[in-house]
Amino acid sequence: MFDELKEKEISYIDKIYDLIKDKNLTATVVTFGCQMNAKDSEKLLGVLEKSGYRIIENEEEADFVLFNTCTVRENANKRLYGRIGQLKNSCTLNKNKIVGICGCMMQERDEVDYVLEKYKHVKMIFGTHNIYDFPHLLYDILSSTYLDKENKKVIEVLAKTDVILENLPQLRKYPFKAGVNIMYGCDNFCSYCIVPYVRGRERSRDASDIIDEVEFLVRDGVKEVMLLGQNVNSYGNKLENSISFAKLLDKVSSIEGLSMVRFMTSHPKDFSDELIEVIKNNKKIARHIHLPLQSGSNKVLLDMNRKYTKEKYLELVNKIREGIKDVAISTDIIVGFPTETDEDFQETIDVINKAKFEQTFTFVYSKRTGTKASTLENVSTDAEIKNRFDKLLEVTKNVGEEQYKKNIGKVFTGLVEEKDIIDGYLTARLSNNALVHFQGEKSLIGKFVELELKESKGFYYNGSIKN
Ligand code: SF4
């Protein structure tokens, strides 16, 4: 499917290469937000590199700067505008400099209008639904800049798409691990979340295409993959040859040469017993599950449209912990949802104490225009929400530390990811997602090592190689 489109996009990469090959141009992509955006940025960087750009990090120096945006939280928008404003000067100095914006934020009409009015130096805008068309859009803006010498802008945001176009060039951050999209969009409409509006309805990739991609990555030196989707547990629901996420995970993990499979994100309402069984029986699947709770109050969960109760969530956590030995569970929690009272917040604290999360990502509710929750009245003051947030940090820190301490003295296998900030030290990630800092040679990066955990530092360990 989409073969012709893929050929067309690749032909634009060739055209760009011919157009800029003697110009010694540089490019950078600045990424905001989640793992899905990080993955999209690898695709954007892959196209830029294949087109003849030298990839650098400095956005002031780069001839082409693309901001891949996130709109889940309001402060991400503010940070973006600050950075775009700062590039005005370098655009005046380098008349051919191109600043572009893409990603979730650009799916919102108001934000696009705001950019066009306030930031005249932004020359290119596209959204999440036509990211596959990046080579074409890039060629358009480059030909107007270098051939026609016009001050044209390329603005193209689609309301929706059915296109799933994979296997264009990618520039992976790590040679030994990679993210693999298994689905796009979300059908859940949690009342606070903008994702279904900006990423569209759920679309799953064919299992055979996913397997082909992972096999290709393994041949290219990848040892660990992370299967990515907004709600991986509903993978395949709308496919003609429908298969469950558990079956897909089983198939991927049986690929020879692959050592570790992770996945992100799970919605608690769709987490099946079949999935627990598959993970339990397959050591190649990471002992880590990210299971967003959001709130422990049944009333707030209903208002959030999460479709589970506190009791169901805790039942699931128990099943996971009983079924999968050494598993770590991480979660997301929102404080200050409009209908949350102090009593509701206490219910959240109760779940944290019972579920004993190894790691908790905490957020203050951020109102997103267009969502159902944005029409609700706030029942709490800012000061009350701030108190709850402080309490949440304290409780989650204590619970996490308690869990981490349980593994001190044990030996685990970890994939060495990078150099530590301390000279002579490296950082590895264990199957349960914990990070370990230890002394070692740079040559170990990309390899699995046995590590003894010596000391817990809250959210990471100090350890040493087990000889
Ligand atoms: S599951 Fe809910 S929170 Fe997650 S992306 Fe979908 S709508 Fe947003």
Image (cartoon, rainbow, N blue to C red):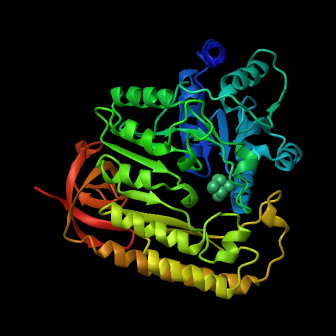
Percent of width and height locating residue 384: 70, 86
Percent of width and height locating residue 146: 74, 19
Task: In this rendered view, identify the residue nearer to me: 111 or 242.
Answer: 242
Whether 366 is drawn above or below 356: the answer is above
Q: Quadrant of the N terminus?
A: top right
Percent of width and height locating residue 183: 58, 39
Whether 301 is drawn above or below 438: the answer is below
Q: Quadrant of the C terminus?
A: bottom left
Residue 166 placement: quadrant? top right
Task: In this rendered view, identify the residue nearer to me: 166 or 66.
Answer: 166
Residue 403 is left or right of residue 385, and the answer is: left
Residue 157 is left or right of residue 408, and the answer is: right
Q: Residue at point 78% right, 44% down?
A: 107
Visible residue check, residue 84: no
Residue 170 is left or right of residue 174, and the answer is: right
Residue 99 is left or right of residue 313, and the answer is: right
In the picture as drawn, the residue positioned furthest to the left comes out as: 467
Q: Residue at point 78% right, 66% down?
A: 373
Task: In this rendered view, identify the residue nearer to me: 234 or 168.
Answer: 234
Q: Residue at point 65% right, 63% down?
A: 307
Task: In this rendered view, identify the residue nearer to me: 427 or 252.
Answer: 252
Whether 12 is drawn above or below 55: the answer is above
Percent of width and height locating residue 442: 26, 46
Residue 226 placement: quadrant? top left
Q: Quadrant of ligand 1?
A: bottom right
